[in-house]
Image (cartoon, rainbow, N blue to C red):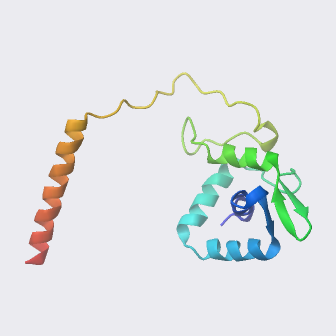
Amino acid sequence: MNFQVTVLKILVSYPDGFAVMEDLKRDMAILATSGRDWADRTRRLAARVPDLDIFSQGLVERESGGWKITAKGRAVLEVMEARPAISESAVMPLVEEAAAPIPVPASVSPLRPPADPAKRRRERRRRRREGRARTRANAS
């Protein structure tokens, strides 16, 4: 689990982005024990901003008994959570450059057109029939 990404995600979930240390510790403990999914997710997000340092880059400030996410911290978190245009393994620019728009290569294809609704219904029915047949076969 990436500590710094987790701190950003916790703080952004609080009103005004401020949480006292007790709340931060409690939420960190919950997320740390929530399983491998959270650790994998924070690792992927952290890989998009490789030189992340929430305090020295001014993403989080220490305030009277707690921590508060800054506007810059919210912007960096948005960049980390944005769907990558090229691939999941593409690394996002450094934090200092995160505010600049990211150019999208012309080779990236637009989203797929929506599938034919009738075809989707047929596929869904077929999968349901197969599932019922498997259930009957396993019940015997």
Observer-nearest of 79 and 64: 64
Name, please, the residue furthest toward the right: 64
Q: Could you tell me which quadrant the C terminus lies in?
A: bottom left
Observer-nearest of 138 and 121: 121
Q: Could you tell me which quadrant the N terminus lies in?
A: bottom right
Residue at point 74%, 63% (across, down) = 7
The location of residue 107, given as percent across then percent down, is: 51, 24
The picture quadrant where one finds residue 97 is top right
Residue at point 13%, 74% (across, down) = 138
Classify 140 as above or below 4. Answer: below
The location of residue 72, given as percent across then percent down, is: 81, 45
How many numbered callouts? 0
The location of residue 127, given as percent across then percent down, is: 19, 54
Observer-nearest of 49 and 99: 99
The location of residue 115, given as percent across then percent down, is: 30, 34
Classify 33 as above or below 43. Answer: below
Residue at point 66%, 47% (across, down) = 80
Classify 19 as above or below 102. Answer: below
The picture quadrant where one finds residue 44 is bottom right
Q: In this view, does 122 lie to the left or right of 3?
A: left
Classify 28 as above or below 82. Answer: below
Name, please, the residue furthest toward the top: 106
Residue at point 13%, 57% (across, down) = 129
Name, please, the residue furthest toward the left: 140
Q: In this view, does 116 lie to the left or right of 73?
A: left
The picture quadrant where one finds residue 43 is bottom right
